[in-house]
Amino acid sequence: MSTKNTPATRHPATRHIVSINDLTDREIETVFDVAQSFLRELPDSHFPYRIGRSTKIASDCILASLFYEPSTRTRLSFESAMLRLGGETITSADPATSSAAKGESLADSVRVIANYADIMVIRHPRDGAVRLAAEYSPIPVINGGDGSHEHPTQTLCDLFLLKKKNKRLKNLKVAISGDLRGSRTIHSFVYALARFGATIMPMAAKGMELPPHVDQRLREEFRCQMVSGKADGKGDGDAIDALYVTPEEPHQQSLFAASELETNADAVGKKVDAVYVTRFQKERWADKEQSYPKIDRKFLSEPKYSDASVMHPLPRVGELDAAFDVDRRAVYFEQAAYGVPVRMALIALLLGLKGKSLHKFTGGFERPKYPLYDQPRPIGIRCANKNCIVHDPMETQYVRNKFYVVKTQSEAECKLRCAYCECDIEDFVVASRKNKWFAADPAALVRADDQHFKDLIVFAKAAEAAEAGFHSRRAAAEPKPARRATSKG
Ligand code: NCD
């Protein structure tokens, strides 16, 4: 194991789960097969969804939980999972009593803790923090929720529940309600749903729609199409009016993942298989007083919800009526119970304890391989998301200005996607170090061959490029070969 003071990209065999898209569809199914085998082999005689006994397969292993944000379910179910596997756990769950309070960086903490454990689960308030941690960790890192970015293991529990209830994952229709902008559970969940061909009905609270980059990825990368959610011609009831988006506003229409099996109209008219409720993520909003939808019996009395599983990642804080708990459609406690077998399966696979190992899989959703623009700080563009880990003063020396160059639909244009938090930047200027020019020409990144690509440097604004000593390409192009004359490398 390397102890060098450099990122851990030199541990190619180590598998991290930061995004749900770090797992292929087949791997997700494998996690579920293994989770199901644990439920079968270690049953609780009274509750079919509960693990009732322990095994010893992880008896040599230690799980470290590193939680910089409050947690009940995620931390305790990870720790229960490790104990049920026969392993041990060590925990740092209070930033005030850990070295974070002394100003230690995450990059340092993970390199220290990696010597004390075999696998690590991290929760952090900053978007992209767990990607940074994974870069520095020689042991597998699992994202237990990073800011409002992603929460992939919650999605595994959600999908496992959906599969149990519907006997399939393909082509489900799922309504998602509440704070779609701030809820990291929703972001991982919608990517996975789209990958499995679901129809997704966003029912955002006012002003809390899906973030633009998630919405764009659904349409561009996961082939979702937008169709009117009211194609069935029916008006919504009072309660729904408060939640549903209007067809006039495109971002509030149903997102429909293209499927060869059904038409858009079929998808709109189809009954809902699940309603996924989320709480208002007040810790992620400056304005803490917001009107927020409530899901209750009345809302769920519409015929289209008659067979819908009502899900919630929990905790709930009033948005899902407790009087609904006795309804046969209320499955949120079962959903939370699956945290143990599903996380047991993920740990066992990442550690290669179950005959199968996630190392042997190719790794990750088969998405386009985007070129990586990677510059040491401080020069050049920085992520525009102020909650991204790159803006954490404790991590300044450990993060880089790293972005994927994502081609847009026209193929001749591109945008930058932060490698940590995955937020996009569409407007920027590109400069040539060699020739000392810059231009408002993002597509220069797409046109450049490998060698030229390394020469290019991106700035957020022309003024920043000029301040750094670059000059506008148009001005320099008039007389002749200023290009080579000023080259400095
Ligand atoms: C979620 C989270 O932390 O994002 N909780 C969980 O892990 N089940 C949901 C939430 O806090 O609202």
Image (cartoon, rainbow, N blue to C red):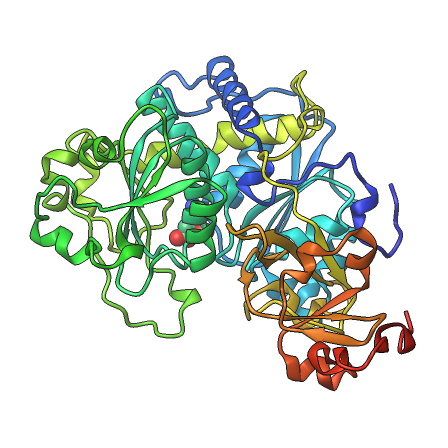
User: Does residue 5 appear to the left or right of 56 in the view shown?
Assistant: right
Q: Of residues 193 and 439, which is closer to you in this image?
A: 439
Residue lying at the far top of the rendered structure: 41
Q: Quadrant of residue 338 in the image?
A: top left
Q: Position of residue 193 (x, y in %)?
A: 40, 36
Identify which residue is drawn at 21% across, 34% down.
265
Q: Of residues 233 and 140, which is closer to you in this image?
A: 233
Identify which residue is drawn at 65% across, 70% down.
382
User: Which quadrant would the N terminus be assigned to in this image?
Assistant: top right
Q: Where is residue 307 in the image (x, y as percent from the top left)?
A: 19, 29
Q: Quadrant of residue 460 in the image?
A: bottom right
* Number of numbered discs overlaid on the protein picture: 0
Q: Where is residue 164 in the image (x, y as percent from the top left)?
A: 36, 22
Position above or below: 357 against 110: above
Position above or below: 28 against 371: above
User: Which quadrant would the C terminus be assigned to in this image?
Assistant: bottom right
Q: Of residues 176 and 477, which is closer to you in this image?
A: 477
Report whether residue 307 is seen.
Answer: yes
User: Does residue 376 appear to the left or right of 178 in the view shown?
Assistant: right
Position above or below: 200 against 60: below
Q: Position of residue 487 (x, y in %)?
A: 90, 73
Identify which residue is drawn at 50% across, 50% down.
409
Residue lying at the far front of the rendered structure: 479
